[in-house]
């Protein structure tokens, strides 16, 4: 029995996903899989085989149910009594609405490794419809039409 190793010179594609009215959790799991390279036949856990992912219209992404107000993100400053909390509603209405998608994807990636940090670095999230990566000729992935549950119904 031989172990397969992907070649070290892997070609990384560029992918653009429109997040308008898309459920954030479903989008994050799809993006994490693309960043790691698990969609490829030659996936190897210790080699970066993932793609570059560009997400546009991140401010128009949706949560299902009452997660917008009931879900709480915690972080700690490192000082005693320094726990801070916020909700997705505050983040999406704030200055950096793209951070909700970034946090969701980051928490679906492997923890604390240089490979995971490299793979997460290939994610670019933009609040508006414009992005500066047209020179890379990214392919457009229609995430909404993959499954009817990917779209948040009104």
Image (cartoon, rainbow, N blue to C red):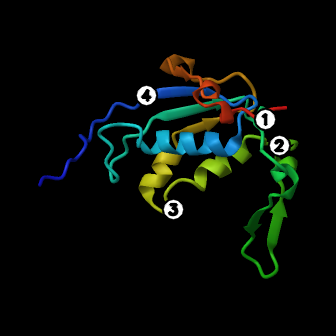
Crowdedness near tag 1: few (<14), some (14–19) or many (≥20) residues, C-alpha within 10 Å: many
Judged left or right of residue 138, residue 48 is: left
Disc 2: which residue: 92
Crowdedness near tag 4: few (<14), some (14–19) or many (≥20) residues, C-alpha within 10 Å: some
Q: Is residue 126 above or below residue 132?
A: below
Badge 3 element: loop
Q: Are marks 2 and 1 in contact (CB under 8 Å)?
A: yes
Q: Look at 82% across and 43% down and name the residue there.
A: 92
Disc 3: which residue: 111
Badge 2 element: helix
Judged left or right of residue 49, residue 132 is: right
136 and 7: which is toward the camera: 7
Judged left or right of residue 118, residue 94 is: right
Which disc number belongs to residue 59? 1
Disc 4: which residue: 13
Q: Are marks 1 and 3 in contact (CB under 8 Å)?
A: no
Q: Are marks 3 and 2 in contact (CB under 8 Å)?
A: no
């Amino acid at each position: 029995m031989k172990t397969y190793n992907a070649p070290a010179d892997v070609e990384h594609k560029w992918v653009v996903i429109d997040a308008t009215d898309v459920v954030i959790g479903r989008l994050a799991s799809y993006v994490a899989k693309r960043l790691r390279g698990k969609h490829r036949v030659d996936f190897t856990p210790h080699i970066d085989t993932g793609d570059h992912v560009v997400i546009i219209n991140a401010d128009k992404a949706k949560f299902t149910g009452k997660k917008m107000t009931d879900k709480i993100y915690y972080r700690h400053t490192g000082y005693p009594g320094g726990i801070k909390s916020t909700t997705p509603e505050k983040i999406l209405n704030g200055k950096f609405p793209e951070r909700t998608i970034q946090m969701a994807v980051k928490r679906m990636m492997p923890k604390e490794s240089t490979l995971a940090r490299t793979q997460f670095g290939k994610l670019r999230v933009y609040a508006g419809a414009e992005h500066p990566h047209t020179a890379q000729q990214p392919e457009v992935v229609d995430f909404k039409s993959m499954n009817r549950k990917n779209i948040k119904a009104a």
